[in-house]
Image (cartoon, grey):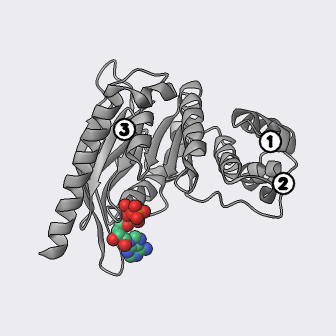
Amino acid sequence: MDDVLSTQALGRPPAAVEVLSAHKTYPNGTVALQPVDLSIAEGEFVTLLGPSGCGKSTLLKMVAGLLEPTDGRIALWRKPVQRLEESGKRMAFVFQAPTLMPWASVESNVRLPLDLSKVPRSEADGRVADALALVGLTKFAKALPRALSGGMQMRVSIARSLVVQPNLLLMDEPFGALDEITRHKLDADLLELWREKKLTVMFVTHSIHEAVFLSNRVVMMAARPGRIVEEVVIDEPYPRQPEFMVTPRFAEYAKRLQDSLLRASLETDEEVVS
Ligand SMILES: Nc1ncnc2c1ncn2[C@@H]1O[C@H](COP(=O)(O)OP(=O)(O)OP(=O)(O)O)[C@@H](O)[C@H]1O
């Protein structure tokens, strides 16, 4: 793959993620994604939204290098994901479930990626402590996961991703299983982290409200076959406070996405019927 996939316009942040005509057909013949083009600038918060089965996870996993595209190209900071290291950037993936080791303490869970990459213990301990502080779990370092609520377990999972000091965070419905209040809290904390750490975030959700609250841009997808059908820029300044969610502007964006989601779902249904 070429190292340089696109020319960078002067003064614009470099593209952190470039998806060029990438598509995916699974071995059983399911066309999960038609060729998709998507560019995410460094520092952007982009959310994928769409009906079930439209290929959100497939796209995210391809960007993460967990799945190979059937064809097309994906680059992170102009490097194929397998050679991301050469760009000096790092990426982390946050799954839907916290997937913690139940027998290990919170700090051991968070340390796992550093142990796997043989980071010396003296350095690892400091990074674990920093990551736990970032998610507000310092006091729970020695606790076992079962002693924590669902929201706290998800925070451990996020700390485990932060410990590698990522530039790009790929998040697959990380808060989907949580109650609404916990979700709102974690959304607000994630935005703070994103700003403080200058992260680039690619986020998957089923929640229109979460998409509007968090994102610079929402990418709407439709299913069967999966594809991008629309992009909506959420042109609102940060920091965004919870009060944003009760403003007329928020309601306008939510309505626009609701209509777009409905259209995407109808397109999906039509294809199923035909
Ligand atoms: N390993 C697989 N083998 C075959 N088909 C798959 C596989 N994984 C996903 N699919 C199919 O590919 C399509 C896209 O799936 P994907 O999980 O990417 O969609 P999604 O938008 O993330 O869905 P959801 O919102 O329900 O999580 C679906 O039709 C799904 O059934």
Q: Amino acid at mark 1?
A: Ala
Q: Is residue 22 found left or right of 268 in the rendered image?
A: right
Determine contact: label 3, label 1, CB under 8 Å: no
Please state if 174 lies on the left or on the right of 136 as rendered: left
| Residue 273 placement, left or right of 147 | left
Position of residue 243 measured from the top left corner of the image (x, y, whole percent): 47, 25
Q: For marks 1 and 2, give the CA distance.
A: 15 Å
Alpha-carbon distance for marks 3 and 2?
36 Å
- In the image, residue 257 lies at what x, y percent? 28, 43
Instruction: Residue 71: name its quadrant.
Output: bottom left
Q: Is residue 99 above or below residue 83?
A: below
Tag 1, which secondary structure?
helix
Q: Earlier in the sequence, mark 1 or mark 2?
A: 2
Say if mark 1 contacts mark 2, CB within 8 Å: no
User: What residue is shown with label 1?
Assistant: 124
Residue 247 against residue 74 in the figure, above or below? above
To which residue does mark 3 refer? 40
Q: Mark 3 or 2, which is nearer the eye?
A: 2
Q: In the rendered image, which residue does mark 2 sit on?
A: 105
